[in-house]
Structure formats: structure tokens, C-alpha cells
């Protein structure tokens, strides 16, 4: 049953009982008042009549007394007076009462005699063995009382109805309505809609409950957000570890193959050179040159593979990040100019890092080269920014350094281009060795994986953000050098 309805029933029931008792008490009081009045009237009238009758001579008392009575109490009066003589009548309850009144010489005032429907007063007359009876019907009085009772009951019902309406309206306004809102909100929270907030501003327990519910929603939302971030971080960490593992495996495999191919390639190149020198046929010389060129290319790729596989441990020294960036940009200047792309350093923080200049130079060269290649024919400029920031390292790095989750000072180099961009489904693969979208011979797909490994060896990390045909940003993040 609804709360407001329960209140309504309770209030109406209590009001009803209180009214009933009130009406009963009022009616009782009214009747008592009337009986007191009646007793006083009977006492006064009876006293006067008895006084008169006591002076009627004993001789012919009955007749004379009746004459006296008829002269004093007229037929119009409510009160009827008569003389009663206990002697000589058949003993009944009534005569016993008369005898008792006479014997005790004590009047009986305004007694209710239901049988005859009368109030009666019995007054002994001294020395005459007679009793004066005053009687008055109580039917009229009861009619008045009934009318009063009906008035009271109607008033009570009207009041109870008033209470009921007020309780219903207030109950709906302050209990029913707000509770419905809170139930809806609780259901929404249960269904995971934590943005649902109630707008109740009541200064009572229900208002308090609404505030608590809102706060609970907010806390749940915050903890859900935290859990989501945490699981994202964990997922990223797992991916990073998987990536590192894959790099190691591919590195071992690649170095094995490169090692095995190195010697045969050297032999092929040697022989091709010999042929080139030994023969005079122009066609053969041309073919031998092609072989030499292609073998050189294969050797270059093998060297890259070996570089990738045999990651040298960095020998870091304190360096200004901006200077490393400027060096890479100026070295790439001829290539970028040739391709019609400008490389502009537009933010120049002078943050210091601990870096192996040669290795980090390789990283920037790879990234800027990629940006130039993606930008050619699409945009005129590749932007580079150097900034100092405070960032939280990825989970796997943070746990290595033993300070999980706390932000640390870092130098950030962002390479921003407005070129082709990377499709969302490919972003996760760009750091994988040999992943390339470039034509055969144009890219080995090692640039980013090498860069990734070098930066990791510096306790840093690389982030990528890309929108196809809009903008790509690669961020190299290296811990800032303290002091
Ligand atoms: N700035 C960029 N814009 C668009 N795509 C990019 C960008 N940088 C990298 N990529 C994508 O990531 C792939 C891998 O890059 P990575 O540098 O590892 O290899 P590569 O450039 O293809 O070859 P390599 O660098 O070995 O010559 C690229 O083939 C390209 O598809
Ligand atoms: Mg590249």
C-alpha cells in the first residue's frame, strides 16, 4: 500500500475515534447539564410545594392537597405533580420506593424512569405519610440531544473529510510525489544511468535521502570512471608488453636471418664486382652493376634489421631537447625541401633530458621523415613542438620506476602533420616491426619500431593520435633531467 494512503487511513481512523469520543463526551456533558438543571428545578418547585402541602390540614388532606396542587401546577406546565400514598395500595416496586423515601425522609431527585419515559422526583411530606411526585417526560430532552448529536456527527464527518483531503494533498506533495521521483532515480542507478539526478529541494528526511542518492550517483560515476581509466591503462600496459615481447622475438629472428644472409650477399657482391671488372661486354657490365646495386640495397636493409635487432644500450647525457630536435630538422632540410614540405619548430621549450644524442636523433629523423612522407602533396608544413609537461607514465613504465600513477616532469616533442593520417584500425600496428603501408622498396616498416625501442630504453614512451586526412601527431616523451 502507498505511504500517503497509509497516512491517510491512519489519520482518518484516529480523527474518527477522537471525534466519536468527543461527540460522546459532549452529549454526556449536555445530558448531565440538563439533568442538573432539572434536579435544581424539581428541588425548588418540590420544596415550595411540599412547604405548602405541609400546611394543608390533616383532615381531608388528600382532596385539599390535590386542589392546592392543581392551583399551583397548571396543565400547560412540563412538570406533572401528584400525591402518592403508600398505605392502602398494593405493594409494588413503586410503593416500596415510596415507603423508603418516607422512612428515610430523604427526597429522590430527578431519577430517570425508563419504563414510563419520565424523570421523577419524590419528596416526602412531613407528618402526612404522603409523597409528592414531580415528573417530566424525557422524550423532548432526548429529541434535543439527538438533534445535537446529529449536528456533532455531521461536523465530525466534515472535519474528518477535511483532514482526509489535506492529508491526501500534502501526502502526495511531500511524500508520494518525491518518493516516486526517488524510486525512478534508484531504478535508473540500478540500470547504470548514473547521470540521472533528482531535483528535490525538501528540508526533511526525503530531501536528505535525495541528496544522499545524488551523492551516491556521483560517487559511483567517479568510481566507474576510475575503473574504466584503470582498465584502459592496464590494457595499454598489456599491449605495450606484448609489443615489447613481439619486438624481441622478431629481433632475434631477424638478426638470425640477417646474419645468415650477410655472408652469401657479400659473396654475390664480390663476384658481381669481379664480373664487372673482368668482362668488356657492355650488357654484362650493366647486368653486373644492377646486381651490385640490388645487393647493396639488400645489405642496407639487412643492416637496418640488424640495427633493430641489436639494440644498443643508450649512453645518456644531459642534453637540451630543443637542440636535438633542431639538429634533426636541419639535417632533414634538404630532403624536405626537395619534397616541397617545410618543417617548422613552433614551440621551443628549453627542457633538458638525459639522452643518447645519436639514438634520439635517429628517433626524430624517423618520425619527421614519416611526417614529410605523409604530407607530400597534401600540406605545406610539418610542425614540431618542444614542451615541458607533467605527465603520468604508462602503467608498465610506472611500475618499472616504482612510482605508479604519479605525474612526473617530462620533455615532450610533438611532430604534427596534416597529411594522410592513419586509419583507426591501423594505429595499433604502426609500432610493429615490418608494418608499412608504403610501396615495396620505399619503406621497411622498421622506423617506428626502432624509435619505440630507443625511447623505451630512455624510460620514455611514444604516443600517437591521428584523424584520417586531417592531422597526425606523434609525441615523444622523455623524462626531464633533474637539477
Ligand atoms: N605521420 C604519419 N602519417 C601517416 N601514416 C604514418 C605516419 N607515420 C607512420 N605512418 C604509418 O606507419 C607505418 C609504419 O611506419 P614506419 O616508420 O615504422 O615504417 P615506414 O615508414 O613504412 O618504413 P621505414 O621507416 O622503415 O622506411 C607507415 O608505413 C605509415 O603507414
Ligand atoms: Mg618510417
Image (cartoon, grey):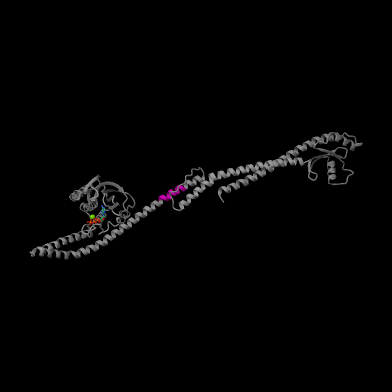
Q: Residue furthest right?
A: 59
Q: Horizontally, is 14 left or right of 212 in the view?
A: right
Residue 103, located in which quarter of the rendered image? top right
> Which residue is nearer to you in this view: 96 or 194?
194
Q: Is residue 382 magenta?
A: no
> Which residue is nearer to you in this view: 429 or 347?
429
Q: Horizontally, is 215 left or right of 321 in the view?
A: right
Q: Horizontally, is 1 left or right of 152 in the view?
A: left
Residue at horizontal 66%, vertical 42%?
Answer: 154
> Which residue is nearer to you in this view: 128 or 283?
283
Quadrant of ligand 2: it is bottom left
> Which residue is nearer to you in this view: 381 or 206?
381
Residue at horizontal 29%, vertical 57%?
Answer: 429
**Is residue 53 placed above or below 471 in the rendered structure?**
above
Residue 316 locus on image (x, y percent): 22, 52
Residue 465 locus on image (x, y percent): 30, 51
Examine the rendering and report whether any part of residue 483 can be seen. Answer: no
**Is residue 255 placed above or below 144 in the rendered structure?**
below
Residue at horizontal 15%, vertical 60%?
Answer: 293
Residue 267 locus on image (x, y percent): 14, 65
> What segment is highlighted magenta in the picture?
213-222
Examine the rendering and report whether any part of residue 424 can be seen. Answer: yes
Amino acid at each position: 500500500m502507498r505511504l500517503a494512503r497509509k497516512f491517510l487511513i491512519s489519520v482518518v481512523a484516529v480523527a474518527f475515534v477522537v471525534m466519536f469520543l468527543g461527540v460522546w463526551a459532549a452529549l454526556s456533558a449536555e445530558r448531565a447539564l440538563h439533568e442538573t438543571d432539572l434536579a435544581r428545578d424539581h428541588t425548588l418547585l418540590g420544596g415550595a410545594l411540599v412547604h405548602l402541602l405541609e400546611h394543608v390540614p390533616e383532615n381531608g388532606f388528600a382532596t385539599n392537597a390535590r386542589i392546592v396542587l392543581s392551583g399551583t401546577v397548571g396543565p400547560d406546565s412540563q412538570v406533572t405533580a401528584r400525591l402518592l400514598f403508600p398505605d392502602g395500595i398494593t405493594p409494588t416496586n413503586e410503593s416500596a420506593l415510596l415507603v423508603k423515601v418516607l422512612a428515610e425522609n430523604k427526597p429522590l431527585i430527578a431519577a430517570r424512569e425508563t419504563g414510563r419515559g419520565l424523570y421523577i422526583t419524590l419528596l416526602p411530606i412531613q407528618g402526612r405519610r404522603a409523597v409528592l411526585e414531580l415528573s417530566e417526560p424525557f422524550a423532548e430532552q432526548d429529541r434535543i440531544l439527538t438533534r445535537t448529536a446529529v449536528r456533532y456527527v455531521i461536523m465530525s464527518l466534515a472535519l474528518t473529510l477535511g483532514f482526509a483531503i489535506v492529508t491526501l494533498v500534502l501526502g502526495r506533495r511531500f511524500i508520494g510525489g518525491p518518493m516516486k521521483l526517488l524510486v525512478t532515480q534508484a531504478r535508473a542507478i540500478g540500470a547504470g544511468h548514473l547521470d540521472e539526478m533528482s531535483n528535490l529541494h525538501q528540508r526533511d528526511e526525503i530531501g536528505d535521502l535525495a541528496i544522499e542518492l545524488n551523492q551516491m550517483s556521483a560517487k559511483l560515476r567517479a568510481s566507474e570512471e576510475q575503473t574504466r581509466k584503470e582498465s584502459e591503462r592496464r590494457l595499454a600496459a598489456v599491449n605495450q608488453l606484448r609489443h615489447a615481447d613481439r619486438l624481441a622475438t622478431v629481433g632475434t629472428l631477424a638478426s638470425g636471418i640477417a646474419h645468415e644472409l650477410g655472408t652469401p650477399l657479400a659473396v654475390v657482391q664480390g663476384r658481381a664486382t669481379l664480373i664487372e671488372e673482368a668482362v668488356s661486354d657492355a650488357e654484362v657490365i650493366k647486368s653486373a652493376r644492377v646486381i651490385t646495386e640490388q645487393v647493396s640495397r639488400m645489405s642496407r636493409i639487412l643492416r637496418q634489421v640488424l640495427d633493430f635487432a641489436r639494440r644498443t644500450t643508450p649512453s645518456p647525457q644531459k642534453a637540451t631537447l630543443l637542440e636535438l630536435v633542431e639538429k634533426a630538422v636541419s639535417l632533414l632540410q634538404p630532403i624536405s625541401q626537395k619534397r616541397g614540405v617545410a618543417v617548422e619548430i613552433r614551440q621551443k621549450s628549453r627542457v633538458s633530458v638525459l639522452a643518447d644524442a645519436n639514438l634520439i636523433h635517429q628517433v626524430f629523423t624517423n618520425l619527421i621523415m614519416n611526417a614529410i612522407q605523409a604530407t607530400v602533396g597534401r600540406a605545406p608544413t610539418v610542425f614540431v613542438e618542444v614542451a615541458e609537461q607533467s605527465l603520468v607514465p604508462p602503467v608498465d613504465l610506472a611500475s618499472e620506476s616504482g612510482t605508479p600513477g604519479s605525474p612526473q616532469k617530462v620533455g615532450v616533442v610533438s611532430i604534427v602533420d596534416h597529411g594522410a593520417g592513419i586509419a583507426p584500425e591501423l594505429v595499433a600496428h604502426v609500432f610493429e616491426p615490418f608494418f608499412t603501408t608504403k610501396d615495396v622498396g620505399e619503406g621497411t616498416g622498421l622506423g617506428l619500431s626502432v624509435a619505440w625501442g630507443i625511447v623505451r630504453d630512455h624510460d620514455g614512451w611514444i604516443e600517437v593520435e591521428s584523424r584520417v586526412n586531417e592531422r597526425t601527431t606523434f609525441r615523444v616523451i622523455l623524462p626531464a633531467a633533474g637539477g
